[in-house]
Amino acid sequence: MTTRVLAALLAGSALGASAALTALPVQADDFAPAVVFDQGGKFDKSFNEAAYNGAERFKKETGTAYREFEITNEGQREQAMRTLVRRGASVIVAVGFSQTAAVEKVAKESPNTKFCLIDDKLDAPNVQSVTFKEHEGSFLVGMAAALVSKSGKVGFIGGMDIPLIRNFLTGYEQGVKHVAASDEVFTNMTGTTPAAWNDPTRGAELAKSQFGRGADVVFAAAGATGLGVLQAAADSGKLGIGVDSNQNHVHPGKVLTSMVKRVDVVVYDCMKTAKDGSWKPGHRVVGLKEDGVGYALDASNRPLISADIEKKLEEAKAQIIGGTLAVKPYQP
Amino acid sequence: MEDLFLLILQLLGATIRVATPLVLAAFAGMYCERAGVVDIGLEGKMLAGAFFAAAAAASTGSPWLGLLAAMAAGIALALIHGFACVTHNGNQVVSGMAINILVAGLAPTLAYAWFKQGGQTPLLPASARLPSVQMPGVEAINGVPVLGSIYRELIDDTNVLIWVTLLIVLATQWVLYRSRFGLRLRAVGENPAAVETAGISVTRLRYQALIVTGALTGMAGAYLSTGHGAGFVRDMTAGKGYLALAALIFGKWRPGPTLFACLLFAFTDAVQVRLQGVPLPGIGVIPVQFIQMLPYLLTVLLLAGFVGKAIAPKASGVPYVKER
């Protein structure tokens, strides 16, 4: 197998082959992980920041530095990954479903580099892909929203209108209806392009329109756009629900809870296993059972979540894990 | 009925909030285009205003210093534009575009260097944001049927910059058509040679116009990052500068129609937000993509069908070279 790969490489362009060969010794004695962040940037206090925290934890624990790249436009994805491969990255973590096409292409070109793709499924011999059961975590925050809502109306604001975000919505709706079947859920999507992840002004306006319709809790699954939603909720004296990272601290006392996706754990595990040799390709789906998703409870939102609410959430969580309570994922 | 009335009021409230930065930017453009300088760099100046307002407010804690910083940044960029195309007769579109590209890169870079939060400023606390004006007697008038709701939804709790914008709109109408400066400004945009013959400096007038432009665009940016929002993020103007330019052309470079155009753009946006996911009688839920297309569709229809020919100030975009 290896000889065939080498032969293929040698048969390829001389430049490409020599680049790959010079990269090999670097990999052997010097482990070099890399992260490619998605649009929104690594300090979006949400999805990308979770990945950043995972990578930082790895750096702290192992003392191995990592390379990184922040995507600012579509064209950079492949280029960034190729550059990282050429510079000898041994494992590349691609954060976000938008990276799928680029990972697929670059992974095929560089079979000696390991790839981890987060939020999408990809079948390749050197790719590990991880998706989350967002609907399970969203179910719990939906329950929390319905339990604290006084008006019986709650809102959802998504980023880009894609199946992934619809999956958050489906779970959220089921959670709300589980508590109070007659509650209303208002839904808004920020946009249909990647710019929808980065428009807090619009997020705030969408939130205000939902408050105008009577909503008193709003769940934002919209990257940096969500910061505008949480801001508007805090300004209007309503409650927001954060996403991906624990965002309870953004406006203490004004963020009911956060639907956390443990992207940090996935990034950390990917780097860690790649370093100690137990890394495996293939696809994983993580949910409540694997602690891949959940709701955040800390000092900032402790006063908002009463012991009674917490008990109900924990019960539902145990039922979902046990399989007695089924949460349906989004079916396009 | 009561619900419908409230809905309309809320839509109008959203319209005003969304329209404010557009109005400021469009009126900024009006000053310099009426003086004969095309300014496609409204977007960049607005973005610079947004960044410097948030940066100054984050580091000093005062939104007013932020507003000043934003206006200063807008003026500085306007002066660069003036230096390139008034003093050196450079191409005005190229210079404006250069400013847009410069700021799009410079603002996140500076934010990264100063705040180390990946091209954003920290989130601003309420005390570092431009306040909303609380009107007296909301409770007292609340019981009055129609007036009460109007007062509560539209007048009370409105950002201070929205009131300033209203003053600027009225002032601009007066300045352009009733003041000596306005007369000269319009003249210099139509026939600079005639103005020069009358013994008035074209260069000086155009620089004055550009300073007003810079100050107003800075204000528009400050509204985005410290009034409506709470902090700067990359590309937060999201094309509002270009939209303002479109409104200016749509309004034929006149204050009233331009204001109307800005409000119309903002209104379609507010309606669009409201229509999302709401089942309409007989049709059902309309796809998000279709609804998000509406403002653009409306703009194209209006521009193509109803506005008629928009005639720019005659000397707009033409550098003035003094005859010797």
Image (cartoon, grey):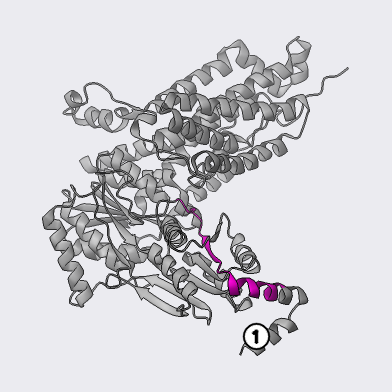
Give the quadrant of the N terminus of chain B. Answer: top left
Give the quadrant of the C terminus of chain B. Answer: top right
In this rendering, position of residue B186 left or right of residue B26: right
Vertical placement of residue A181 versus B120, above or below: below
Q: Which residue is mark 1?
A: A5
Residue shown at 34%/33% (left/top)?
Answer: B126
How many other residues sit within 10 Å of disc 1, few (<14), some (14-19) or many (≥20)? few
For residue B186, say whether it is visible. no
In this rendering, position of residue B298 left or right of residue A306: right
Q: Amino acid at mark 1?
A: Val
Residue B144 colored in magenta in the image? no
Q: Position of residue A81 (x, y in %)?
A: 60, 66
Residue shown at 75%/35% (left/top)?
Answer: B91
Residue shown at 34%/42% (left/top)?
Answer: A231
Residue A21 colored in magenta in the image? yes
Front one among B223 and A67: A67
Q: Position of residue A83 (x, y in %)?
A: 64, 64
Q: Which residues are magenta?
A: A19-43
Vertical placement of residue B241 versus B293, above or below: above
Front one among A103 and B223: A103
In this rendering, position of residue A270 left or right of residue B180: left
Q: Position of residue A277 (x, y in %)?
A: 48, 78
Outermost residue, right side: B324
For residue A237, say whether it is visible. yes
